[in-house]
Image (cartoon, helix red, strand yellow):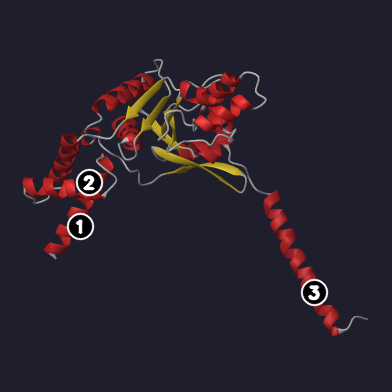
Amino acid sequence: MLDLEAQQSVMAILTRMDAILEKVDRLLTVQHPTESDDNQALDSAIAFTWQRIDGRGRFRAVRHVDLIRLDDLLGIERQLDTLARNTRQFLHGAPANHVLLWGERGCGKSSAVKAVLHAYHRDGLRLIQVHRHDLLDLPEIIERLWERRERYILFYDDLSFEAEDASFKELKALLEGGIQARPENVLVYATSNRRHLLPDRFADRQATITDDEVHPNEAIQEKLSLADRFGLRLGFYQIDQPTYLRIVGHLAQVRALPTDAAALEREALRWAMSAAGRSGRSARQFIDDLEGRLALREE
């Protein structure tokens, strides 16, 4: 016969075991997404993110998409023309290239992709944002999009890899060279601050040469070959002062801000000196600040 303390201890253990068994039962009865689940999600929006929760990959609709008009992006007209043309080829079923948009921070790389979505979503263009840690899910994502009638851009924003990171090989296989075919309704658009996506350090080259590598050049080329899989590589650079002021003036006009042109330019240049230089992003941040100050003044 157990005493009272021993009985209480046994009851506590049994309660914990019941809780554990309940959790195990929930895990075992998890339903994986079906084709109808995918279609329901993909029919509901124009932009999505890919998420893996409890071992299940899902398309999550983005309800409030940050859409930008092509006409509002100044100073990068050449890059926009090329990106828009490539996207139109894709939408018409003609050959089109994967695109790498690389270059300076805040110069419109991500905005260009969002602007293309805004311009062509009525023609069946859709955007799926995929993160670097989801690279291993690429075969699953592609398989689920294969029979869809829309055209999908897999969007990797601010993509880069460290030298020891081998996951970039999954992306290489998707872009070109993998055993699984790529459906004609899927393209990859990626943005990066690095032209080659991987760091290319002089010290790394020296280490490769002095290591046991018999053909050091081949090891270096392996690291740089990922960017070569993108048929189009568009460079974005820091803008000059006249272009920066043109963007500021355009944004002030779009938002109908009551400002003197000369004063606007003086304040904008002062802002650029204290910010991260001249860029479309710093121009927008300046206008945000100015609009906020004017609103408080009106109150």
Label 1–label 3 contact, CB within 8 A: no
Q: Is residue 138 left or right of residue 154?
A: right
**Residue 11, which numbered label?**
3
> What type is the residue that disc 3 sits on?
Met
Q: Image point 44% across, 40% down: which residue? A: 48
Label 2–label 3 contact, CB within 8 A: no
SS at circle 2: helix
SS at circle 1: helix
- 1 or 3: mark nearer the eye: 1
Which of 41 and 97 lies nearest the eye of the viewer? 97
- Pointer 1: what residue? 292
User: In the figure, 144 relative to 61: above or below?
Assistant: above
Horizontal and vertical percent for residue 74? 21, 34
**Residue 189, which numbered label?**
none
Mark 3 Cα shell of 10 Å, populated few (<14), some (14-19), many (≥20): few
Whichever of labels 1 and 3 marks the residue nearer the N terminus, that label is 3
- Pointer 2: what residue? 272
Q: Is residue 292 left or right of residue 125?
A: left
In which image quadrant can residue 281 be found?
A: top left
Question: Going by the picture, which residue comes out furthest to the top?
Answer: 94
> What type is the residue that disc 2 sits on?
Ala
- 2 or 1: mark nearer the eye: 2
